[in-house]
Amino acid sequence: MSETTPHSTPAAPSVRHGHSRGRRAEISLRALQIGLALFYGVASALPKLIAHPSAAESFDKIGWGSAGMYTIGALELAGAIALVIPLLSSVAAAALSALMVGAFIVQLTAFDGRNAATPLILIVPLAVIGWARRHRTADLVRLGRGRA
């Protein structure tokens, strides 16, 4: 018994520390999801959905007009909402990443690279969310197949 006690005693704090670290990581990840959801919903989608002159001008310049502007705004808003729905968060991160690839290409081709780094920077936290929440995609597939 004396042999197991010394080994068990140090393990207890490390288990608690591991649990605490996992909890902190989960809270940080959730905060990241909420922060990105607010960014996409308020700073990115809202100007498009209310036809702010700067957004309308940008979409006119690329030839997409108001239909393109409202479509992209709606997709961003849907992605923002889905980021905070646990079952949809991984898929939302992937979809918003795809939008950011498109935004990067548009920035390079239509706007001479101005602000082209922004969509690439946003892909990084989206990839973190997508990877960390990837088990949710499997849950979503099972739900879609009626096996949940």
Image: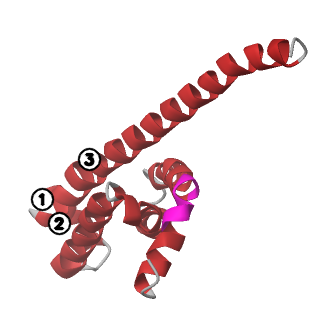
Which mark is nearer the camera, 3 or 1?
3
Q: List the residue tagged with mark 2.
A: 56
Dividing the picture into quarters, in which one does residue 10 lie?
top right
Q: Which residue type carries mark 3?
A: Leu
Q: Position of residue 118 (x, y in %)?
A: 45, 49
Q: Residue at x 22, y 60 (%)?
A: 45
Q: Position of residue 67 (x, y in %)?
A: 19, 81
Q: Residue at x 32, y 54 (%)?
A: 84
Q: Residue at x 11, y 58 (%)?
A: 52
Question: 133 and 142: which one is in front?
Answer: 142
Q: Which residue type carries mark 2?
A: Ala
Q: List the residue tagged with mark 1.
A: 53
- Real-space Cα distance between discs 2 and 1? 5 Å
- Real-space Cα distance between discs 2 and 3? 21 Å
Counting residues from the start of the chain, the first of labels 3 and 1 encountered is 3
For mark 3, give the secondary structure: helix
| Span colored in magenta | 131-136
Prevalent SS, magenta region: helix
The correct choice, above or below, for 22 with respect to 144 in the image is above
Q: Is residue 136 left or right of residue 14?
A: left
Q: List the residue tagged with mark 3.
A: 38
Question: 73 and 110: which one is in front?
Answer: 73
* Position of the N terminus by quadrant: top right
Counting residues from the start of the chain, the first of labels 2 and 3 encountered is 3
Q: Is residue 25 left or right of residue 111?
A: right
